[in-house]
Amino acid sequence: MSVFFPEEEVRSVYDFPFESLTARGIRGIVFDIDNTLVPPDAPVDARCRALIQRLKTAGFRMCLVSNNKAARILPFATAVNLPYVERALKPRRYGYRKAMARMGTAPAETIAIGDQLFTDIWGANRAGMHSLLVQPMESREEIQIRLKRLLERPVLALYRRKKGAEK
Ligand SMILES: [Mg+2]
C-alpha cells in the first residue's frame, strides 16, 4: 500500500509553504494541473499565475505534467510560461523523467504535486521523487475519476492512520 502513500498531504497548493522546500534540497517542482492548480479544464487564474510567479522568483524550476492532451495543456503552459509534458502516462515514470530532464534536476531534488494517489503519487514514488498530495479542488469529475476516488478511499484512510500514529 505504501507505494501509493504521499510523503505529505496538504489541503491545497495555495496553502503550502513552498519556501520550506529549499532547506530540504528541493529545487524542482512537477505540477499536475487539473484539480491541483485549477479546477478541471479551467484556464489559468490570477491565484495560479501569482503562485507560479512567486516560485519562479524564488528560483524553483517547474514543469507541468499531465495525462491530458496538448489541446488542454498547451494554452495553460503558455499562459504561465512553463515547460510541460502532455499525455504523460502517469503513473509511468516516462513523464516524470522527461520533466526532470527539462528542469535539470535529480529525483531527490524534485517534488511532484497532485491530487490523485494512483497517478500523481504512485508515479512520483516510482520515479524516486518527493511527493505531495493535495485535495481535489472540485468534486464534479468524470466517471472514471470518481471510480478511482472510491478506490483511493481505503488507501487514504490507511495513510492518514499511519501518519496519525507517527505523530
Ligand atoms: Mg489532477
Image (tube, rainbow, N blue to C red):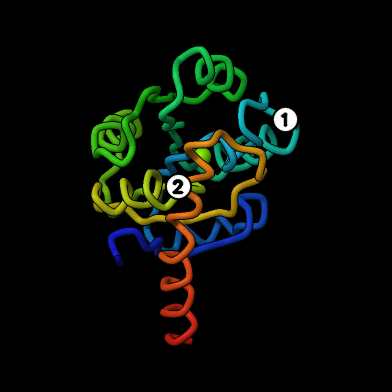
Residue type at tag 1: Asp
Place of residue 117 in the rendered image (x, y in percent of width and height, measured from the top left): 42, 52
Please give left or right for residue 129 compared with residue 82 in the image: left
> Does residue 134 lie above or below 102 as drawn?
below
Task: Please tell me which residue lies in front, 160 or 45.
Answer: 160
Q: Say what secondary structure mark 1 lies in.
A: loop
Residue that appears at 63% across and 41% down? 54
Q: Say what secondary structure mark 2 lies in.
A: helix
Place of residue 72 in the rendered image (x, y in percent of width and height, measured from the top left): 53, 18
Mark in front: 2 vs 1: 2
Q: Residue furthest top?
A: 71
Task: Please tell me which residue lies in front, 32 or 46.
Answer: 32
Q: CA distance from mark 2 to mark 1?
A: 27 Å
* Contact (Cβ within 8 Å) of mark 2 with mark 1: no
At label 2, counting other C-alpha atoms closer than 10 Å, the crowd grade (few under 14, some 14-19, many 20 or more) is: some
Q: What residue would you read off at disc 2?
A: 148
Q: What residue would you read off at disc 1?
A: 45
> Does residue 167 lie above or below 142 as drawn?
below
At label 1, counting other C-alpha atoms closer than 10 Å, the crowd grade (few under 14, some 14-19, many 20 or more) is: few
Residue that appears at 64% across and 36% down? 38
Dot label at residue 107: none
Disc 2 within 8 angstroms of ligand 1 (CB): no
Residue type at tag 2: Lys
Task: Please tell me which residue lies in front, 8 or 151.
Answer: 151
